[in-house]
Amino acid sequence: MSVEPWASPKDQAAAERPHSPDTPPSQDQEQHPDKLCLDSFWSEVETIQQGSGYTDLECSRGESRQSEDSEQDEQWLADAGLSTLISDDSEDVDVFLLSTLTRTQAATVQRRLDSYTLSLRKRNKPAPRDVRDIFNSPITQTLLPESQHSEDLAQNSMASVTKTPLSEHQRCAPKEEFFITDVAYCEQAVLFLKQTKLSQNNSQRRKEDATLPRVIHTKCRLGVTRIQDLSHTDMKKVRQLALIDMTALCDLLELEVKRHKTTKRKIPESTLFGVPLSTLLENDQKRKPNISTPLFLQALLSFLEKKGVDSEGILRVPGSQSRIKLLQQSLETNFYSGQVSWDEVSPNDAAALLKKFIRELPAPLLTAEYLNTFSAVRDITDLKQKLHMLNLLILLLPEPNRNTLKALLEFLSKVVSRERRNRMNLWAVATIMAPNLFLHKAVPSRLTEGAEKGQAEKAADVMRLLIRYQDLLWTVPNFLMSQVRKLNENSNRRYQFYDRHIKNLLKKIHTDSREKPDKNTSEPCRTVKIEVRDLTSDTMEFQLNISSRVSDLLAEFHRQFLRSPDNGKGKMRRNGSVVYPDYALYEVGGNIGEHCLDLETHLLDLYNSNPGGEWVIKMKPNASRGL
């Protein structure tokens, strides 16, 4: 059987094996992209080159250069919240952020600072303060034991993973993978690499399977934290810590993470196409506050979900170029006035406009800084490590880009779910959409001649992972949540380190003032504030026990204040819990800014994790119904 040059080694092996008549066609197509997918990929690339002015791509690539090493390192330290390490004022060093890092993360910061120092020496400039001096400061000596203790807990929690011999997993690809987020991803990589090295002499390395297994998010008693559940202040700290962990992971896996400068492009006089996402979203929020994605993209995706997901070959079949041009002109002129008639629009033309909107953004949707890192994920052999890297990269995206990407992936997932009607499986959708996200004039490319197919394969495979595991990727790992809580606690005690006597006194006052359960009481009672329109000043008491969850508290709230039965306002889940779409319990203050809690969060564990925080019931930002 002939094998397409696009195919990866796993696909070549699958092609050489005889096809089983019992294998469902859709599964076989998922494992090996057919020739139609490959032809469509290069047709898509050709369309991009012709329609987007890619004829001058080499010129733009030549004009765009990578940043100098010192600029790269300086920007990295600034994005990680550690710019004070290279500032003249050594007293302003944020040792509290450093104190939350694991050993591998701290080593990554040291390497970046050493690289920056070396670049300055070559330019005959004075070197900044050595980070080792900062770790040896009296303040950090007080905080570092917590970091070391957390690292020991991380190794203990991973013990069950390392006990399983790798050879057992090498014999056949598992149907399920467990996604652990309690331990820093870089620390998991350290253990994985040690385990792989030890087992190299005994067995062959496990080959990556072509089919994508089900990945199970391991449950935490504090629940799952979605990106939208945290305040902007806490998310900024999440991004700083995620950058450090992502860089540490790249160093361990020997992936290149150098950033690129975006070439300056003249922004066209347009209202929709070629407009920066942040500008477009800012203009739309003046018309409709609290939206997270551009109104035009919402309208386009809504139309395609109604009229396009069942169209055979949607996204792959090109529309009429003349109709697409007229439709774009009409939308540019009449979209905001509401004079566009979507009833006359062809789904294929709308799909072509969607792809054009994405690729004509002045900067890549995946950003110039991280576009190559997204593509390099394909070089990682272990699936869980791929997902670890993608999870961190999603957290690093600017909010407009992250929300836009999420809306796009949700639509693509709906297209894949209607494969029986539209004949577009996961591989087909991934290969068609990959060029629109991974090829961009603003980002230089160092591809040698003949390497385009390998790069295309990387892009399509990463696109496939983004679509398949998007629900998993838009979460904040538990270890980052723990680091944010620790960072907030340390920052709140900043004033206590100037005088030992004052520190001890304030520490005693702070400890006594905290709301802690009585030692003789195993089931404390917690006061919950209610901020829902007319009930703003009301409170309710809720008795905590080891099995109490957020869903139980919300059910009690509905019974007491809304006079509704258990299921009167909610939707029953399979596990028996009730989903209340309008109201949520928020954790406010203490060691967190504001945190919308998952319904499965165990309240007693949350209470012990943040005894100084308040609990508030209020309506979700996008809730439409009132009391």
Image (cartoon, rainbow, N blue to C red):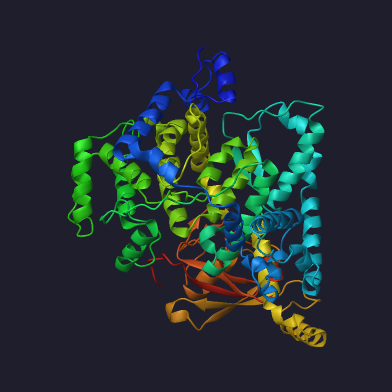
Residue sitting nearer the eye, 127 or 510: 127
Q: Position of residue 351 (x, y in %)?
A: 31, 40
Which residue appears at 54% of the width and 15% of the height?
Answer: 19
Q: Position of residue 289 (x, y in %)?
A: 35, 67
The vertical placement of 613 against 374, above or below, is below
Residue sitting nearer the eye, 358 or 580: 358
Which residue appears at 74% of the width and 82% of the height?
Answer: 496
Q: Which quadrant does the C terminus fall into?
A: bottom left
Residue sitting nearer the eye, 230 or 596: 230
Q: Quadrant of residue 54?
A: top left
The vertical placement of 467 against 46, above or below, is below
Horizontal side of residue 20 vs 48, given as left or right: right
Q: Residue furthest front?
A: 124
Q: Can residue 310 be seen in this snapshot?
A: no
Q: Can residue 378 be seen in this snapshot?
A: yes
Q: Quadrant of residue 411?
A: top left
Which residue appears at 71% of the width and 75% of the height?
Answer: 524
Q: Position of residue 369 (x, y in %)?
A: 51, 51
Which residue appears at 58% of the width and 49% of the height?
Answer: 391
The count of marks equals: 0
Horizontal side of residue 485 vs 438, given as left or right: right
Q: Position of residue 183 (x, y in %)?
A: 71, 53
Horizontal side of residue 610 vs 448, given as left or right: right
Q: Quadrant of residue 602?
A: bottom right
